[in-house]
Image: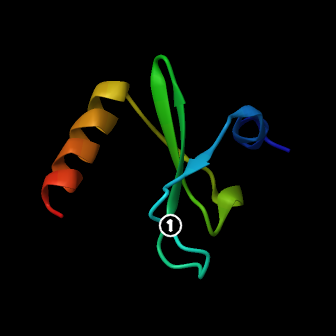
Amino acid sequence: MNTEQSQAQSLHWFKSSYSGGEGGECIEVAALPHSVHIRDSKDTGRGFLTVSPASWSAFVGHTSRRH
């Protein structure tokens, strides 16, 4: 097991409450004080993207205004 896989297993991942059980397009997020990790909920073994909390906040703010 590589280091990223070990780290991913130790994080507490959350899936969107808007995500249905039928599989569609969904992500999981693990937020820490200095980073936010994002991964594909359908293929959790592929790794994850890490962004700053400010970047994540800007992304969520932008997407929530579009709906």
**Quadrant housing the C terminus:** bottom left
Q: Residue furthest right?
A: 1
Residue 39 location (% of width, % of height): 55, 53
How many numbered callouts?
Answer: 1
Residue 38 location (% of width, % of height): 50, 47
Which of the 4 image quarters holds residue 42?
Answer: bottom right
User: Which amino acid, mark 1?
Assistant: Ser
1 displayed left or right of 54? right
Q: Residue furthest left?
A: 65
Q: Is residue 61 above or below residue 42?
A: above
Q: Secondary structure at mark 1?
A: loop
What residue do we see at 71% from left, 58% from top?
Answer: 45
- How crowded is the residue under tag 1: few (<14 C-alpha within 10 Å), some, or many (20+)? some
62 displayed left or right of 39? left
Residue 58 location (% of width, % of height): 22, 37
Q: Residue furthest top?
A: 33
58 displayed left or right of 19? left
Render colour scheme: rainbow
Which of the 4 image quarters holds residue 15?
Answer: bottom right
What residue do we see at 20% from left, 43% from top?
Answer: 61
50 and 53: which is toward the camera: 53
What residue do we see at 51% from left, 79% from top?
Answer: 24
**Quadrant housing the N terminus:** top right
Which residue matches tag 1? 19
What residue do we see at 36% from left, 27% from top?
Answer: 53
Q: Residue furthest bottom?
A: 22
Q: Is residue 41 above or below residue 47?
A: below
